[in-house]
Amino acid sequence: MFPFFSRSKMSDAPEVNPAPAKTHEPHPLDALTGGAFSAATSGERASRIRDWLATHPASEQLQEVFKELSGRDKGAARAVRERLDEIRRAKGQEAIAAEWADKAQALLAAPKLNIADALAWQRDAAKAGAPLSREPLSLLKVQLADRVKVIEDLQHRVQVQREAAVLLAQRIEVLSTKPWRDAHAALELLRADVARWQEQAQELTGDASWASVEARFPPLLDASRTQLLVVWEAFQPAVAQAAAAAEDVSAPLPPVPVWADELRAARGLPTEAAAAAAASAAASKPARVAKPKVAPEVIEKAHQLVRDALATLEKETAEGHGKASAGAAAALRAVLKVHGKHIDNALEQQVHTALVAAGELEGWQRWSADQVREDLVAKAEALLNRPEGQALGGRKMQETLRNLRDQWKQADQGGAPNHALWKKFDEACNAAHKVVEAWLDKIRTEAAEHKAQRLALIEEVKAWAQEHAASGDWKAINRSLYQFGDRWREGGHVGEKIFAELQPLWKQAIALAAAPLEAAQKESLARRHAMIDEATALGAAPALRIDAVKALQQRWQAEAQTVPLDRKHEQKLWDAFRKPIDEAFNRKSADRDRAVTELSARDRVVLDASKALEAANATGDAQQIRAAMQALEAALRGQAQAAEAVATANKDAQSHAEAQANAAPAAPAATEIGAEASAEAAEGGDTAAAAPAPAPAAPKPAARPVVAVRGDDRPGMKKDAPVAPGRGARPGDRRDGRPGDRDGARGPRSDGRMGDRADRGGRFGDRPAFEDRGPRLGDTAFRAQREAMEHAQLALKKLAAQAHGEALTQLLTAWEKRDAALVPGTQDLGSGVTASVRSAWTQALSAAPKGDAAEALLRLEMAAEAPTPAEHIAARRMLQLQLLTRRNDPAPTQTWGQDVARVLASNSDAANARRLQNVLKTLLRK
């Protein structure tokens, strides 16, 4: 069943039963949106939608409101769409946040966390668009940052512990050079410090994040612990042994030389150095005779010299200068040899203590220097013992040997030389230098070959220059010069001295070869600059000459193809040449666009008529639409007539609107209209409203020599305009409007083959003259009038469909109520229903129900080519077979009006009403 539409406003005939005016029913979503759908203006509707969105409605409600509102007001629906997009983006961000939250939790749950992975998580999450400022990503980001901070703190503490271990070992070593009582006094404090260091190291290794520390830090901590424990375990027994030796004279002395000499002195024994000196003196000299008495001046002078030498030695020893302390010790020994017999025992003891300290310092420096030398010897020997595939090349070997020898020189500057280690080091370096010598021989051989190749290339360039001096193929010459340059650059390595000799020769030869090309390029540049000036003059001219521009461009292309230039320079010249021409074309295009955009008087009239037609389309009134269409047609025919027609249409529309505002809601009763009036009022059977009286024909303008006709304006191509008589709309159509054989109306031919064509009146004699349509419309006006016409035709079709559905609904209601007064008029039913057919229908409804409508419904379904219900298909086939035997009976398409009367005469039921409605939807449109 069709929905109930409001009665069309196109009919002027009064209705039989006046229908009350319908009130606007509220939209079902008005209660939800606060009356947004019933708002009078778009601004009020958008305001109510914003107020409703402030309540945060559900997504389903937003979808429903957007679906209904998008067809009514796209501006108001934009806010709903933005809210839906925001919800979708939020859902997408939630999915991304969940994904990156899982990755962060996996990193935190792993027993070993890589700092790089933790930092990369935050960077990659930000690139992926994850909301790091929202939960839970913000909390996970903080947790990862805290975890990374803990790991970095552990690594820093490892370095601190390493430095602390080094400082503790240095304290122990310094105590071994001081009196043993000082070491014994500091033993407990050292024990507490070492124990605290071990506890701190244990805390580091026992931390939960210790597994995430970089791999280089645990070995550092283990090495520091091992070194400290070795020194500490050697220091404790030495202190205990020194204390036992101090208490017991028979106890062995400690292994520390300073402590042993101190204990020997406490026991009254000579020191180890003094005992050795006395033994050597006793072996070399006879027993001393009694010393003669020495003058006090000599004794005082001896004391002064010894004290000065002793002070110098102690100063150098305290500052740790190895070589200076060795020299000061030698100077002190020399002074002792001369004046040692004149000093007392106390001064002599100080001298021996200073000499022992200087000897220990010299021994430590010698030991450390030897350690460096041994490492250098090992590195030098390892140069030739590298794994297979990792041997050093000649240049790398040369640099490595140079570095090793420089390090050996630095080691010799810090301590006494070691000739045995130097011999081993020098032998290893000499053996490794054989690789360097072989590489140098190869380099010299290759340099000689490369020099010969470059000299040969120079001679080849000179010969080529003489051979091609008169050639005019500049492209080939340029290509050859580039090839020569590539060969020179790829000629191999030569020494700097040889290259400095060859480079001037090469430049001279290549300059001689490139001289003709450079001269041609100079001339080409002059010609190109002249063409640029010519292009500037053409671009500045008021009228752009296309032929001159094309000829100039062809000359430029010919010049560019003849003489090559550097690519960058040639591009700059081309840009300078093209710029004025492009600017001229741009000015021409701008002038053309400006001329197009400037509307003529006729275009403005057509635009005004198009706007008036669009306004009439919005009213939904067929009478206003048709009046506006006629006004637009008048505007298309001429300017003066258009102005008058537009003014008349606007005046009629205003008066009609005032009449509708003042008229009563009920329409007058309708009367039946005869078949002739119905046929005149109906429009092709597809509309149910009568057309208004046509406007007076406008006088045709004077004939013009040029006729501009657009494609859509051809006669016969418009949907609402009939084909002009005597002119076919499509190829093959007959001029008299009747389909059929093209030769049917030609008549008999004459005796000639082609016949006598004199009676046809010429080739175009049977066609009317073209109607003068005036000057060609602008693009804007043409598009506006075409869109307005299309919208008007769609609106009229929609109104006709509404009127057709309403008429069909009234007919079915009249059948159901058996009330002939409810049958619509012939004007409403369309041109397919004549007055006699409508009379038969009203008579059928006025009488009592009788007869069976089964066969009549089958005939109607065949006439409308509509489907038949499944339970009646067999009856339809039987009826079709019967109709095949009735050759003289009219077809169902010719008697459908009588068949409808037979159906209306029968009883009404829902199934038959549905079948009748389906067929009448098609038949009433034919």
Image (cartoon, helix red, strand yellow):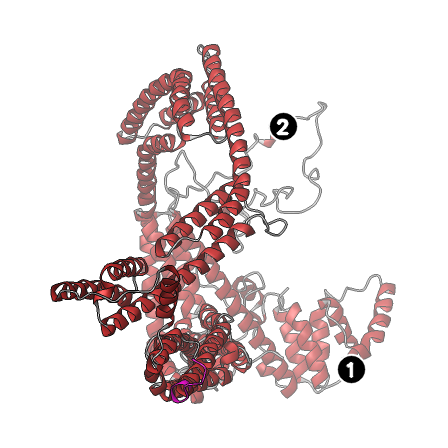
Q: Residue 757 carries which label?
A: 2
Specify the amino acid type for callout 1. Asp
Q: Main secondary structure of the magenta part?
A: loop
Q: Which mark is residue 890?
A: none
Specify the amino acid type for callout 2. Arg
Of pointers 2 and 1, the one earlier in the residue sequence: 2
Does residue 904 sit above or below 689 in this rendering? below
**From where the camera sits, is residue 368 visible?**
yes
Q: Which residue is drawn at 75% across and 75% down?
A: 857
Q: Quadrant of residue 872?
A: bottom right
The spot of residue 370 in percent (x, y) is 44, 58
Residue 250: say if magenta. Answer: yes
Residue 634: say if magenta. Answer: no
Residue on which the image places disc 1:
852
**From where the camera sits, is residue 135 visible?**
no
Q: The C terminus lies in which quarter of the figure? A: bottom right
Does residue 94 sit above or below 290 in this rendering? below
The spot of residue 347 in percent (x, y) is 23, 71
Q: Element under label 2?
A: loop
| Labels in figure, total | 2
Q: Is residue 353 left or right of residue 796?
A: left
Q: The N terminus lies in which quarter of the figure? A: bottom right
Q: Is residue 546 left or right of residue 229?
A: left
Which of 56 and 130 lies nearest the eye of the viewer? 130
Give the CA distance from mark 2 to mark 1.
63 Å
Q: How crowded is mark 2: few (under 14 residues within 10 Å), some or many (20 or more)?
A: few
Magenta range: 245-253
Q: Residue at x 36, y 86 (%)?
A: 184
Which of 808 and 1 lies nearest the eye of the viewer? 1
Does residue 671 sit above or below 292 in this rendering? below
